[in-house]
Structure formats: C-alpha cells, structure tokens
Amino acid sequence: MKKMQQNQARIKIINKKMEEKEKNMSSDASSGKSVNLSLSGMTCASCANIIERTLNKVPGVKKASVNFSAEKALVFLMKKTPAKKI
C-alpha cells in the first residue's frame, strides 16, 4: 500500500512538471504547427521519457512533451514539416 502511495505521488509530480513544460512550450506554438498524439502501452514514467527523447530526435520536430498519465504527446513541428511525417 505504501509503495502504491509513493507511485501516485511520483505521478502527480511528473504531471505537474509536464503541465509546466507544456505551458512553456505553448509560446513556441505560434511559430509552427503542433500535433497531439494519443499513446498507449506505456507502463511507467521511464517509457514516457524514452518516447519523448525519441520524438525530440525526429527531424522536423522542434519540441516534444509526453504525459505518462494522460497517455498523450504534444509535438511542436518546425514550420515546413508536414504532420504526416511524424
């Protein structure tokens, strides 16, 4: 039970950080396109971190943010990058 509470506390912290990150990223939205992706199959915050780092390495991606508990990714693209490329 204690481990479950610790995990829930960690998830809340991660969600708060992701919300702050998304607010900071919103200023970049005006300079290009953004795409919201639905994700599934993530089993831990580490999975979300791996996906986020991988998305940030994709050519044409300006910034990416993955929210583990919401199972979503917010991806900001460079102006000339078509969303289909992602």
Image (spheres, grey):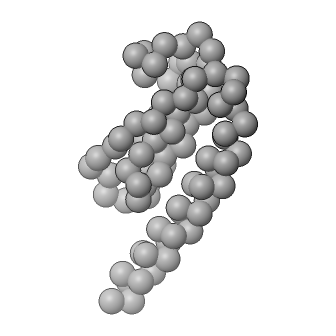
Q: Position of residue 77 (x, y in %)?
A: 57, 23
Q: Position of residue 5 (x, y in %)?
A: 41, 83
The quarter of the image holding the C terminus is top left
- Looking at the image, residue 14 lies above or below residue 5: above
- Looking at the image, residue 38 lies above or below residue 16: above
Q: Is residue 63 visible?
A: yes
- With 80 as the anchor, is 36 left or right in this view? left
The residue drawn where x is 70% and y is 32% is 28
The residue drawn where x is 70% and y is 23% is 31
- Looking at the image, residue 62 lies above or below residue 21: above
The quarter of the displayed image where residue 32 is located:
top right
The residue drawn where x is 34% and y is 43% is 39
Q: Position of residue 65 (x, y in %)?
A: 54, 43
The quarter of the image holding the N terminus is bottom left
Outermost bottom residue: 2
The quarter of the displayed image where residue 33 is located:
top right
- With 30 as the anchor, is 38 left or right in this view? left
The quarter of the displayed image where residue 38 is located:
top left
Q: Position of residue 50 (x, y in %)?
A: 45, 44
Outermost top residue: 80
- With 38 as the anchor, is 20 left or right in this view? right
The residue drawn where x is 63% and y is 15% is 79
Outermost front residue: 30
Tally the numbered discs.
0
Q: Is residue 50 visible?
A: no
